[in-house]
Image (spheres, helix red, strand yellow):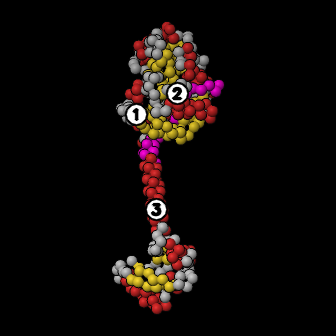
Amino acid sequence: MSKFERLEHLAHKLTRVQTDLGEFFEIPPDLFAVLQLDGSFQWVSPTWEELVGWTPAVLHRRCWTEFIHPHDISFSQHFLKLLQTSASQRAKNSLKNRFQRGDGRYQWLSWNFRLSHEEDVYAVVRLIEQPSLIADSPHQRVLEAAEIGCFQLGVNGRYTSVSTAMARMHGYISQEEMLKGLADPQQPTCVEMSRFAELLKLLRQHRTIKEFELQTYCRNGSVLWISLTVQSVLGEQGTLLCYEGIAVDISRRKRAEADRMQLLACEQAARIKAEIVEQRFRELIDGLTDAIVWECNPETLQFTFVSRSAERILGYPVEQWQSKPGFWVHILHPDDRNWVVAFCQEETKQGRDHEFEYRCFTNDGRIIGFAIM
């Protein structure tokens, strides 16, 4: 084969490869593009017009920052710079951002980049429904299994992304349904929106807030208690891009706390009522003029309670009855002491109620008779 024939063969082969490559790039649903490191489009596949609404002619030579959502420009451009400086620049790198469609709406795209030896950036791009930086976390499956919801908020505080667990936690069938249900700016997402505004204010001050509790509305209108841990996501120049966080359902704990508080309140009310009853009882028995109400240990005959009337009738301080061992036995009349003690202990041992009469000395030496009932 002559040199000319070889060149002709190579040219034909190159043309065929280019044709095959062009046909490959037209295969939906992926989008294909070649960009420079500054973000300008060098070539895009025809599928961009069908899926995004821009013809290749419109995109050619224009910078992708003209179409990227303003909140996503900073980190998207920074990502391209990292491709050039990264030690693993030949490896595939992924990015998600919002891209303006031909009709003006923003569409989330997932970009997979590879930097060529000629410093061109090859990109395979896909339309995605529910992007989330959090969803790319290696811990996402663990969070989902633990029923811990993940979410992303825009700078205005509206949800832009939620995980499956987050949607399920609020009674929605899917992530899309939850975002659609929360799309109305007039629809409150929290029971107390002032509480949510407080969260955003704290995030602007501290960037990361942990275990912030608030009540949110579920799909059916019921209220859910959640604990949020949220952090601010900043761009290269410190510009706020969005908020990301996790949510834990604490409704069961809150119900338990409410039940415990109610139980404590009931116990407190019962205790106060018992104290009132006891106070009234003491006032009643202390008002007796000719009777003494008392309580003692049946085995030791040590008094644990004596009404104030004992002091008025017998003259001994009430404290003496309770503090001095054997005080009551000591003031019994000598002729009654032995049989009274024996009788009381025996009847008590047998578990029988008993009545009897005895005599005892007053503090001033007088003898008074009593009937135990």
> In the rendering, at what x and y percent does residue 201 appear?
59, 31
- The mark found on residue 157 in the picture is 2
Number of numbered markers: 3
Label 1, residues with CA under 10 Å away: few <14, some 14-19, many ≥20: some
> In the rendering, at what x and y percent does residue 229 appear?
53, 38
Give the residue displayed 49% in from the left and 16% down from the top. Answer: 100
Left or right: 331, with 352 as reference point: right
Residue extent of the magenta highlight: 237-257
Give the residue displayed 52% in from the left and 78% down from the top. Answer: 314
Tell which of 27 and 53 is nearer to you.
Answer: 53
Label 2, residues with CA under 10 Å away: few <14, some 14-19, many ≥20: some
Task: Residue 100: say if magenta.
Answer: no
Q: Which residue is mark 1?
A: 218
Q: Which residue is mark 3?
A: 280
Q: Earlier in the sequence, mark 3 or mark 1?
A: 1
Label 2 element class: loop
> In the rendering, at what x and y percent does residue 223 appear?
41, 36
Which mark is nearer the camera, 2 or 3?
3
Could you tell me how far apart the alpha carbons at marks 2 and 1 are, in whole angstroms? 18 Å
Could you tell me how far apart the alpha carbons at marks 2 and 3 are, in whole angstroms? 59 Å
Label 3 element class: helix
Label 3, residues with CA under 10 Å away: few <14, some 14-19, many ≥20: few
Q: Are marks 2 and 1 in contact (CB under 8 Å)?
A: no
Tell which of 269 and 331 is nearer to you.
Answer: 331
Q: Amino acid at mark 1?
A: Cys
